[in-house]
Image: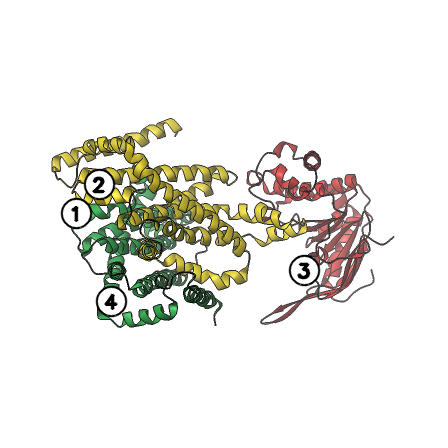
Chain colours: A red, B yellow, C green
Amino acid sequence: MSPMLEVTGLGHTYEAKDGAHTAISGLSFTVENGELLCVVGPSGCGKSTLLRAISGLIRPSEGTVSLHGTPVEGVPADLAVVFQDYSRSLFPWLSVQRNVEFPLRDLPRAERHERAEEALAAVGLSAAARKHPWQLSGGMQQRVAIARALAYRPALLLMDEPFASVDAQTRFELEDLLLRVRREQETTVMLVTHDIDESVYLGDRVLVLSKSPATAVAALDVPLGAEREQIATRASEEFVDLRARVAGLLQAREPVEA
Amino acid sequence: MNLLTRFTQHWAVFLVAVAAWELLTRLAGSPFFPPPSTIAPIMVDQWFSATFFDHMVPGVGRMLLGWALAAVLGVALGILLGRSARAIAYLGPLFAFMRSIPPPLLVPFFVAAVGVTDMQLPTIVFGALWPVLLNTVDGASGVDATKVDTARVFRLSPAQWTLGVVLPAALPKVFAGLRVSLSIAVVVMVVSELVGSVNGIGYLLVQAQQFYDLPVMWAWIVTLGVLGYLFNSLLLAAERRALAWQPRHSLEAQTLATGG
Amino acid sequence: MPSGLVGMVGLFAVWEAASRSEVVPSNYLVPPSIVLPTMVSMLGDIEFLRAVIATVLAAVIALAIAVAVAVPAGLVLGSVPAVRRAAMTLVEFLRPIPSVALIPLAMMTFGTGPETKITLAVYAAVWPILFNTIYALDELDPLHVDTARAFGTSRVGVLTRVALPSAAPFVLTGVRLSAAMALAVVVSTELLSGGTPGIGRYIMVANSSGSYMDEVLAGTVLAGLIGYAANAGLERLHRRLFSWSTPKGVDQ
């Protein structure tokens, strides 16, 4: 069986008037079914470009992306993205409930409601269904965006720095929420972050990218088990060790055998 | 402050102002400035006689129809063109030029082109179109990149994208444009009727001028103020409903700045 | 060719075609191939130039008076809530009166001299400046005020060195909107009153003599160009003076 996502020799160059800029080059990796892969790289290394190429928002200059065996051309139907900028990604003129239902237009009304309610319950926002996004805190808005993506039931959920714009406390809560939800719903997730700790805490595997143009430096397995806990896990020896290795790899420029 | 005291204060100020107006005009005794006690009965007569149906209804009807046509046309075109950077680059300056033509100047052209009896409506449409169009273009082109990406990721249909994302995102700007257009429509209505018409408030204003009937002129001016206030309040109420999703502050600030 | 000009050229092309093909009778919609040369030759006519200058001058004077009245009034209304509540009630009833409705009255009261059109234009131009000034004070960042106060700035200092500079971009936006209003009212008054020279008057005369549609259209296009130039000039000034400010006040 083919992997959920297969990226082969991916490269992208932006053409600009003052010369071309290569954001990513020669990038190859896979995401297995049911896996949570964290992609970590220094700021500005081309993580967003990678995500846009995988989601079909841009056509990469080189290489291929295939989603369960089918090459990606345009945005695939069974893929959802959670963006960093939740305040812009949500539609301010719609209630929370309607935001979650928004991409489900083709479904019958009853099923739309049901799916939205289920997704809102999963992120603990059932009580806020009738509110408008601006009435919620940043962390709650991002939960709405996650609920919207979940209600869409994608085969692959992409997350672009999803917790980078919320405070540290909320961030921990949302990380645990993500771990719980993907366990319950068996979602395949690829999450892009610049935060080393986050990548280790969340990931089944961590893919380390180099500075721009981004290439894969290494992919590490994270043998921390399915149950993780913010304080104990982060204090464990394996966690500290893994974090140090990821940090070390981020410094390296050349691919290393992990 | 609660709503009731605010309401009372509002009308108290208004009544004091009218009393002062009455007092000053009586003291001055100038024929050019009749007191409100003279003006009010004339207004009552204007509103509750055949004049209402013979002049106010046709004139104001043309104004509202022209404004509505301009609104529909402006919003539709603005949404269509606003998402194309190329269309804006080519047509933006042209639209800005069209808006810069003082709307009353269109009256002579339309008088010649369609004749004195029929020129009011096209003149109003032409004058009121540009603010709606330009504001809609502005609102539609301002949809942020994250929303564009979100819409693409969820594979929205063109109809859902246009009506579900671009239109609501542009709506605050659209309403600002509608308000400006409404006041232009009133201005063009009056000017076109002053220049030449067989009915309408402007027509009666010119008649009153010819008979040196100052109280009647004043009555029509106050009536126009009342009508303007009425239509503007209705539009504001519609806006509040349509934009209820906006945080309160931005709505009020916007209303103030555009002179709502 | 800059892309913006393409649109204008396109308009002239459509206009030319519509007029030549007689879709619209060409004695009304005179083609631009006649109108544009007419405009050039009109600009060589001293009589017409005087009319243009008279119109522009009246609008500029009206605008200056409106600024002198509306900015101080806006500052007071924006900073003293009690005065504001009372005054806004009156403003709410005064503002909806379309200035052009006052033309017949003003002609009888003040006569048909230039002061009539200037007075009416002031009345129309005051509102956008007034509202934008009040709005500017509402939008004044309290943190800026606190910062200035923390550095020991006096109340007057806060007004002159913090409030006024941050209000200035909004005021200029108001002035830009008012400029269009002032021009429209001046031209309307000229259309309707026989007395003073101006573009409106010139167009009215050309129109009433029937056969001068080319002059009517040339004058209209020229008035549009003047309005466009005024708007573009004020926008440029805005960018130059206030390159530091992201919000431009509320544009319409």
| Mark 3, secondary structure of its residue | loop
Check disc 1: other Cα within 10 Å, few if <14, some if 14-19, many if 20+. some
**Alpha-carbon neighbours of circle 3 within 10 Å: few (<14), some, or many (≥20)?**
some
Query: Percent x, y for residue A185?
Result: 77, 40
State whether discs 2 and 3 lie on one chain. no
Alpha carbon distance from label 4 to label 2: 33 Å
Question: Looking at the picture, which amino acid does disc 1 mark?
Answer: Met
Residue denoted by label 3: A58
Q: Quadrant of residue C12?
A: bottom left
**Location of mark 2 (residue):** B217
Three-letter amino acid code at the position of disc 3: Ile
Find numbered disc 1 in the image and state the secondary structure of the residue it sits on: helix
Residue C60 picture location, percent across and down: 27, 59
Q: Are marks 4 and 2 in contact (CB under 8 Å)?
A: no
Residue at mark 2: chain: B
Task: Identify residue type, mark 4.
Answer: Phe
Mark 2 residue type:
Met
In terms of sequence position, does the residue under pointer 1 or pointer 4 come before the other?
4
Query: In the rendered image, is residue B169 in sight?
Result: yes
User: What mark, if any, has residue C48 been given in the picture?
Assistant: 4
* Foreground of the two, A218 or C167: C167
Are the residues flagged by discs 4 and 3 in contact, CB closer than 8 Å?
A: no
